[in-house]
Image (cartoon, rainbow, N blue to C red):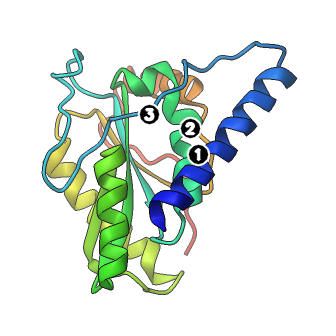
Amino acid sequence: VFEARLAQLERENGALKLQLAKTAGGRSRRSPAGISTWGPSKNMSVSSTALGVAGPLVVLGIISAPEYLERRLGIRHSWLQWANVKSGHIGASFVVRSGNSPQWLDQLLDAEQERYNDVVRAPTVAWNETRLRGPVLSLAVWLQYAVVHHSSARFIGKMDDDAFLHAGDFERLLRTVAASPLSTYLYMGAMSW
């Protein structure tokens, strides 16, 4: 069932890409289509050294609930295809809560990880945690993970799976900020409580 749904979503996404390309008159700032293989797995991670760069400028944890496969596919087929993401300057992984998940969900997440190699599972956060607590707890897992597994990254970031990142502008902004002597400790974004 998972493979059939995944194939259907990829076909729909391919048709959408074609329609967008026609609308833009063939002008695209994105790199050619393909599946990004950047990202940590529970068994291995791609090091920035293996990608030919000294270390990523930033690694992003994209917080996603287990049921949002469509959102993850949308991101994989849009901004994760930009050249600066594929080259390793911007790293991205989906952080998916999976604590006490049923067997069928484990199988789905395992298949997704095997296919895309960009899922960081949050086994200490219940798979069915509330929409208020789930993302916050998943963020804590991501930050703990990123500090250990991406220590060469200049910045560690978080975003939600319903946001779009203009990877080119984001990299330019971070390079400007990184050049500042005040960039040792930095918070960018909105904060509310």
Label 2, secondary structure: give it.
loop
At label 2, which amino acid type do we have?
Answer: His
Q: Earlier in the sequence, mark 1 or mark 2?
A: 1
- Quadrant of the image occupied by residue 28: top right
At label 1, which amino acid type do we have?
Answer: Glu
Q: Which residue in the structure is indicated by mark 2?
A: 77
At label 3, which amino acid type do we have?
Answer: Ile
Find residue 125 and report its horizontal and vertical position in percent: 31, 79
Crowding at dot 1, Cα within 10 Å, few <14 / some 14-19 / many 20+, comes out as: some
**Residue 112 or residue 137, whichever sits in front:** 112
Mark 1–mark 2 CB contact (< 8 Å): yes
Q: Which residue in the structure is indicated by mark 1?
A: 10
Horizontal side of 24 relative to 119 (left or right) equals right
Q: Residue at x 40, y 25 (%)?
A: 86
Q: Residue at x 38, y 20 (%)?
A: 179
Find residue 41 and report its horizontal and vertical position in percent: 22, 51
- Which label belongs to residue 35? 3
Instruction: Give the Cα distance between marks 3 and 1.
Output: 11 Å
Q: Residue at x 74, y 38 (%)?
A: 16
